């Protein structure tokens, strides 16, 4: 299921990149192409800021994971409670890593979109 999520994120970002590429190539006038490229740059900037904020969020979750592991080791509620806590902590850790990987995929494609838009603005 994890790889299906990665594949979906890759495919959706690739389709976005292809749409930007074709829309910029079909614009005949430089002014229209530049306006469209600037609008796409603004959108890519907003998505990039959101991805960077998610890294801050993931960093905070990682701190909570470490604290939860420390507290779970200190309490002596029994083996069943400890096992369930460890399972919850490992599930959260897995979800955090998956979210980070998806954010990296987003940032890779957003960087490609930015390069494409800048190249269309600079070239005539």
Image (cartoon, grey):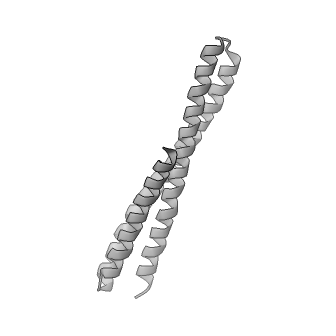
Q: At 43% from the left edge and 86% from the top edge, which residue is drawn?
A: 123
Q: Is residue 121 above or below residue 50?
A: below
Residue 56 visible at all: no
**On-image quarter of the C terminus:** bottom left
Query: x%, y% of residue 8?
Result: 43, 54
Where, by quadrant of the figure, is residue 77 drawn? Answer: top right
Residue placed furthest toward the bottom: 124
Location of residue 73 with respect to 56 vertically, above or below: above
Q: How many marks?
A: 0
Q: Where 34 sits versus 96, above or below?
A: below
Residue at point 70% right, 17% down? Answer: 74
Report whether 85 appears left or right of 33: right
Q: Position of residue 66 (x, y in %)?
A: 65, 31
Residue 60 image position (x, y, % from top left):
57, 38
**Residue visible at 48% across and 73% down in the picture:** 115
As displayed, is residue 37 above or below residue 108?
below
Q: Nearer the viewer, residue 92 or 113?
A: 92
Residue under the image location 60 percent in, 32 percent down = 90
**Residue 114 visible in the displayed image:** yes
Horizontal relation, residue 99 to residue 20: left or right: right
Where residue 36 appears, x then y in whole percent?
32, 73
């Amino acid at each position: 299921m994890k790889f299906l999520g990665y594949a979906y994120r890759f495919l959706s970002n690739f389709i976005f990149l292809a749409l930007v590429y074709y829309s910029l190539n079909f614009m005949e006038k430089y002014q229209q192409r530049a306006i469209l490229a600037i609008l796409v740059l603004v959108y890519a900037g907003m998505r990039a800021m959101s991805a960077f904020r998610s890294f801050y969020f993931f960093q905070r979750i990682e701190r909570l994971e470490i604290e939860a592991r420390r507290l779970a080791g200190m309490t002596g509620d029994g083996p069943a409670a400890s096992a369930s806590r460890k399972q919850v902590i490992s599930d959260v850790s897995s979800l955090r890593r998956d979210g980070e990987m998806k954010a990296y995929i987003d940032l890779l494609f957003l960087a490609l979109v930015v390069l494409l838009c800048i190249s269309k603005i600079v070239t005539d």
